[in-house]
């Protein structure tokens, strides 16, 4: 069974304090790993897709990396507007659906 | 270009009542999905559709039915609501091509008393 576990559940940082969020996964052949951002009262918003181990993608203060067992979302010098819940999801080879983790709730204090 | 639109945004039902949630997308996407989101459980797939006239079961399909009569619309029905169906429901769509991302609506918050 495909599984995704995210850690920590919640993380509080000061503005400018860099950190990383973890997404561990088990899947029968990875087709893609996705990162989403979700603001309160909104639907998830797509950030990145990673396809194979060693791949990295960047967007503003966010960088996502991928290994064979986990993915990291690195946040560099975060700002209060980066506060949100970050979701990780995997798609197995041959599957039409995504399996989501429970998310990490990130709070950046000014 | 509105993306994915869900109606209604909020609804309160009594146990045993029925209702339909509507999802509409204007991106000409082939695939559409219904998820529910509960605290501590993450997003769980209820049903999905890979094209007009098709539907398939996800992880938690019991108590729900769906229809995809038109490509742009995906309906989620609750025939006899139960308190366990209290949740936030999200619709999503995608192109259906390899690794195409999901685009989500802003959700329907349903409370069943």
Image: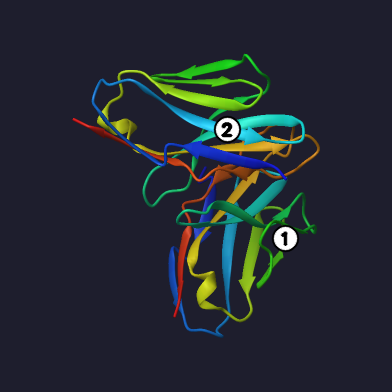
Residue A88 badge: none
SS type, badge 1? loop
SS type, badge 2? strand
Q: Which residue is mark 2?
A: A24
Residue at 44% in and 80% down: B113
Residue at 62% in and 34% down: A25
Q: Is residue B27 visible?
A: no
Q: Position of residue A99 (x, y in %)?
A: 64, 44
Q: Quadrant of residue B46?
A: bottom right
Mark 1 nearby-residue class (10 Å; few <14, some 14–19, many ≥20): many
Q: Chain of mark 2?
A: A
For residue B100, side relative to residue A88 (left or right): right
Residue at 64% in and 79% down: B79
For residue A79, side relative to residue B40 (left or right): left
Q: Nearer the viewer, residue A9 or B52?
A: A9
Mark 2 nearby-residue class (10 Å; few <14, some 14–19, many ≥20): some
Q: Position of residue A3 (x, y in %)?
A: 64, 42
Q: Nearer the viewer, residue B27 or A36?
A: A36
Q: Is residue B111 visible?
A: yes
Q: Which residue is mark 1?
A: B68
Q: Tell me the mark number nearer the camera, choosing from 1 and 2.
A: 2
The residues bearing labels 1 and 2 have C-alpha atoms spaced at a distance of 34 Å
């Amino acid at each position: 069974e495909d599984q995704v576990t995210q850690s920590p559940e919640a993380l509080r940082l000061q503005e400018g304090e860099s950190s990383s969020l973890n997404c561990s996964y088990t899947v029968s052949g990875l087709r893609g790993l996705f990162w989403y951002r979700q603001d309160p009262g909104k639907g998830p918003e797509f950030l990145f897709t990673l396809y194979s181990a060693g791949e990295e993608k960047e967007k503003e203060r966010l960088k996502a990396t991928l290994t064979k067992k986990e993915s990291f979302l690195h946040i560099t010098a975060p700002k209060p507007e980066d506060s949100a819940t970050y979701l990780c999801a995997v798609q197995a080879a041959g599957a039409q659906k995504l399996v989501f983790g429970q998310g990490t709730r990130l709070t950046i204090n000014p | 270009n509105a993306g994915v639109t869900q109606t209604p945004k909020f609804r309160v039902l009594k146990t045993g009542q029925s209702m339909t949630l509507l999802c509409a997308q204007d991106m000409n996407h082939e695939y559409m999905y219904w998820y529910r989101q509960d605290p501590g459980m993450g997003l769980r797939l209820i049903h999905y559709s890979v094209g007009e006239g098709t539907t398939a079961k996800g992880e938690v399909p019991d108590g729900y039915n769906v229809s995809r009569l038109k490509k742009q619309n995906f309906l989620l029905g609750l025939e006899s609501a139960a308190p366990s169906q209290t949740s936030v429901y999200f619709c999503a769509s995608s192109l259906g091509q390899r690794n195409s991302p999901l685009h989500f609506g802003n959700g329907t918050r349903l409370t069943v008393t």
